[in-house]
Image (tube, helix red, strand yellow):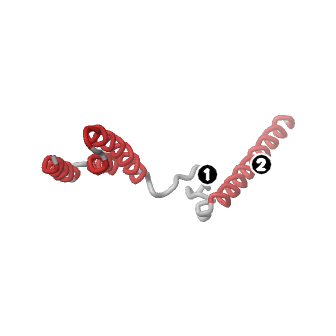
């Protein structure tokens, strides 16, 4: 039994080199590790059940961890200056960035109101 698990582990590890995402690699490695842990913990006739449960749980956990590692490392900003960069990019604290974004939104709303008032005044003048 141990020999077959060792062979399956070696094949799974060899196949992880062919994977392109951390999610797939994490799923394979997690499944193998969970199966080995379940096989170690299980006793008697429950060993097969614990091996299968460990493999399933390991696959899920490994896949989620890999998916988390596949996420982009830098945040995407929506509020930008006319120059194309974010006014609030320099703030790394999420609370400070949120306050900055609220300020940008308020400034943009004020500009819009001023523009609409000017257009209204121009319309009334004719």
Residue 101: quarter of image: bottom right
Q: Residues within 10 Å of mark 2 (few under 14, many from 20)?
A: few
Q: For residue 108, say whether it is visible.
A: yes
Residue 112: quarter of image: top right
Q: Position of residue 31 (x, y in %)?
A: 29, 46
Q: For residue 31, say whether it is visible.
A: no
Please tell me which residue is depicted at 78% across the width and 44% down the height of the picture: 113
Secondary structure of the residue carrying numbered label 1 = loop
Count how many numbered circles sit on residues in the image: 2
Please tell me which residue is depicted at 61% across the width and 51% down the height of the picture: 79
- Left or right: 6 in relation to 104: left
Please tell me which residue is depicted at 62% across the width and 56% down the height of the picture: 81
Q: Residues within 10 Å of mark 1 (few under 14, many from 20)?
A: some
Q: Position of residue 6 (x, y in %)?
A: 16, 52
* Dot label at residue 21: none
Q: Are marks 2 and 1 in contact (CB under 8 Å)?
A: no
Q: Position of residue 89 (x, y in %)?
A: 58, 61
Residue situated in front as seen by the camera: 50 or 91: 50
User: Which residue carries the number 2 mark?
Assistant: 110
User: Which residue carries the number 1 mark?
Assistant: 79
Q: In front of the other: label 2 or label 1?
A: 1
Residue at far front of view: 44
Residue situated in front as seen by the camera: 36 or 122: 36
Q: Position of residue 111 (x, y in %)?
A: 75, 49
Q: How far, Cα to Cα, is label 2 from label 1?
A: 15 Å
Please tell me which residue is depicted at 33% across the width and 51% down the height of the picture: 22
Give the quadrant of the C terminus.
top right
- Left or right: 40 in relation to 75: left
């Amino acid at each position: 039994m141990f020999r077959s698990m060792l062979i399956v582990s070696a094949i799974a590890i060899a196949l992880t080199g062919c994977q392109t995402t951390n999610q797939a690699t994490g799923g394979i490695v997690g499944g193998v590790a969970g199966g080995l842990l379940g096989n170690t913990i299980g006793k008697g006739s429950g060993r097969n059940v614990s091996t299968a449960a460990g493999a399933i749980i390991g696959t899920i956990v490994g896949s989620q961890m890999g998916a988390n590692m596949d996420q982009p490392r830098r945040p995407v900003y929506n509020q930008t200056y006319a120059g194309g960069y974010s006014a609030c990019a320099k703030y790394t604290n999420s609370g400070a960035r949120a306050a900055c974004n609220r300020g940008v939104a308020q400034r943009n709303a004020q500009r819009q109101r001023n523009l609409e008032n000017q257009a209204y005044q121009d319309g009334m003048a004719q």
